Image: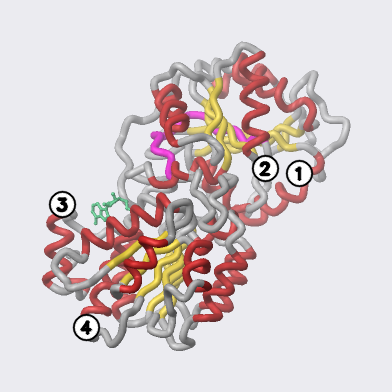
């Protein structure tokens, strides 16, 4: 299947050839014809799947098919962070090389005046973070009456970052008749709610992780009190000689705390989350990849798009709020024929989250207890048998399993081949410029 057979014009196909793309990625195969047909789209896709070209190429074609009438914008692409906005804008510029489309990007944390001047000159495609876009609207620098196509990119992250009110305000200002494209890595209840009010009979595309988990990922649960989790994790890392383990926490403070405690315990660890500068993240990742650091502690948002190859071991130090995140997390291990192990440390107060995950993956995870770490408060559905710690050691033993070394390709899940984008979770909230949680 080629780009031209998807119905794209010669100019747009030429732009993809210039980029060295040979064949469309799975999301492009599905999204391009749907968008060209004028349909609304709801896509579960992460960074690295080629989603940007998936919506940009057909969007450009639709704009080129109808001559413009005013000063636009005719297509509005909302993104959570300024880094993503800048990258999407770069992509729009690359793909629109041979079509007469004007694109602009606006985001917070920089002067607003140059952005106002740019908008005054007229623009076809506007890439924006929600906060700054609302500021520009309130200052009469942008109007939405010509918007024909709306794209919400990384919608889940936008909601995580508290943009829902801005998004709702913007939606209320757009012409009712328009095409809507929603891209999100996960589909929580909140995203589904947003989608329901936004999308009209959408084509649903899913190239992200399925809600079933890979056969070759061994999943287990240790029932343990919250206060004992760090000590248990230290023990597991030591006893099993894990040399490279990705550990998930729910919050960035939790990630920092855990990292410090592990370090105190003599286990090298770094945290990666939205409060870290890009430089600090890049350094942390490099140290982890080179084996200088055994434990990488990450929040869900920061981990998305992390360019790390398959890991033998993933630990959920805290269970994710959104069950789909569990599937993304454990998708980090056990890929490409390698066996992996995803282990969750679950305290009694997380029982509900565990139940939500088990409902999603349609199976009950075996519960274990570690001798010396038996919880005071049991999880619902208490395990019948206690785990044999020696077995645990054997099962994961050696810990010398390194990533498989194979490159990630389209359709792999989750994460991305580019890997850079989602590391930029320190995106600034357009309006306030304050750092976001990730
Ligand atoms: P995205 O998921 O949009 O962030 O894209 C991930 C990376 O894949 C970007 O660096 C794109 O330039 C690249 N890419 C997009 N489409 C293709 C394709 N069909 N073939 C090869 N690379 C692609």
Q: Nearer the viewer, mark 4 or mark 2?
A: 4
Tally of numbered discs: 4
Disc 1 target residue: 350
Q: Is residue 203 visible?
A: no
Q: Tell me the number on the disc at residue 65.
A: 4
Q: Nearer the viewer, mark 2 or mark 3?
A: 3
Classify mark 4: helix, strand or loop: helix
Classify mark 1: helix, strand or loop: helix
Residue stretch rendered in magenta on the structure: 305-317
- Look at the numbered disc 2 and say if its residue's Cβ is closer than 8 Å to ligand 1: no
Disc 2 target residue: 319
Residue that sits furthest to the right in the current view: 376
* Quadrant in which the C terminus appears: top right
In this rendered view, identify the residue nearer to me: 18 or 31.
18
Which label's residue is closer to the chain start, 3 or 1? 3
> Relative to residue 255, is residue 148 depicted above or below?
below
């Amino acid at each position: 299947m080629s780009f031209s057979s998807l119905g794209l014009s010669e100019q747009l196909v030429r732009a993809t050839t210039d980029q060295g793309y040979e064949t469309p990625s799975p999301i492009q195969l599905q999204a391009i014809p749907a968008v060209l047909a004028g349909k609304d789209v709801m896509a579960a896709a992460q960074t690295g799947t080629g989603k940007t070209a998936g919506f940009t190429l057909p969007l450009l074609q639709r704009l080129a098919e109808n001559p413009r009438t005013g000063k636009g914008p005719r297509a509005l692409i909302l993104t959570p962070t300024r880094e993503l906005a800048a990258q999407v804008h770069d992509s729009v510029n690359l793909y629109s090389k041979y079509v007469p489309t004007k694109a602009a990007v606006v985001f917070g944390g920089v002067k607003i005046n140059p952005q106002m001047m740019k908008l005054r000159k007229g623009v076809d495609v506007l890439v924006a973070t929600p906060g700054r876009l609302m500021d520009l609207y309130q200052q009469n620098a942008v109007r939405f009456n010509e918007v024909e196509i709306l794209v919400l990119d990384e919608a889940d992250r936008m909601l995580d970052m508290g943009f829902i009110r801005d998004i709702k305000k913007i939606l209320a200002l757009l012409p009712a008749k328009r095409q809507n494209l929603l891209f999100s890595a996960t589909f929580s209840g909140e995203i589904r709610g947003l989608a329901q009010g936004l999308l009209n009979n959408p084509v649903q595309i899913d190239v992200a992780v399925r809600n079933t988990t890979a056969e070759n990922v061994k999943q287990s649960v240790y029932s343990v009190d919250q206060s004992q989790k760090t000590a248990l994790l230290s023990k597991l890392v030591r006893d099993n000689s894990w040399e490279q383990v990705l550990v998930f926490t729910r919050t960035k403070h939790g990630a920092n705390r855990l990292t410090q405690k592990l370090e105190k315990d003599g286990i090298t660890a770094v945290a990666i989350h939205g409060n870290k500068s890009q430089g600090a993240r890049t350094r942390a990742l490099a140290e982890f990849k080179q084996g200088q650091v055994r434990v990488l502690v990450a929040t869900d948002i920061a981990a998305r798009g992390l360019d790390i190859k398959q890991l033998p071991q993933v630990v959920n130090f805290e269970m994710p709020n959104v069950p789909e995140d569990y599937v993304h997390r454990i998708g980090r291990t056990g890929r490409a024929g390698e066996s992996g192990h995803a282990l969750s440390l679950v305290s009694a107060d997380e029982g509900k989250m565990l139940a939500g995950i088990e409902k999603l993956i349609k199976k009950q995870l075996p519960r274990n207890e570690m001798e010396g770490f038996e919880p005071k408060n049991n999880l619902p559905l208490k395990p019948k048998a206690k785990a044999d710690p020696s077995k645990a050691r054997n099962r994961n033993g050696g810990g010398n399993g390194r990533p498989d070394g194979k490159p990630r390709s389209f359709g792999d899940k989750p994460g991305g081949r580019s890997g850079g984008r989602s590391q930029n979770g320190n995106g600034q909230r357009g309006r306030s410029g304050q750092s976001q949680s990730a």
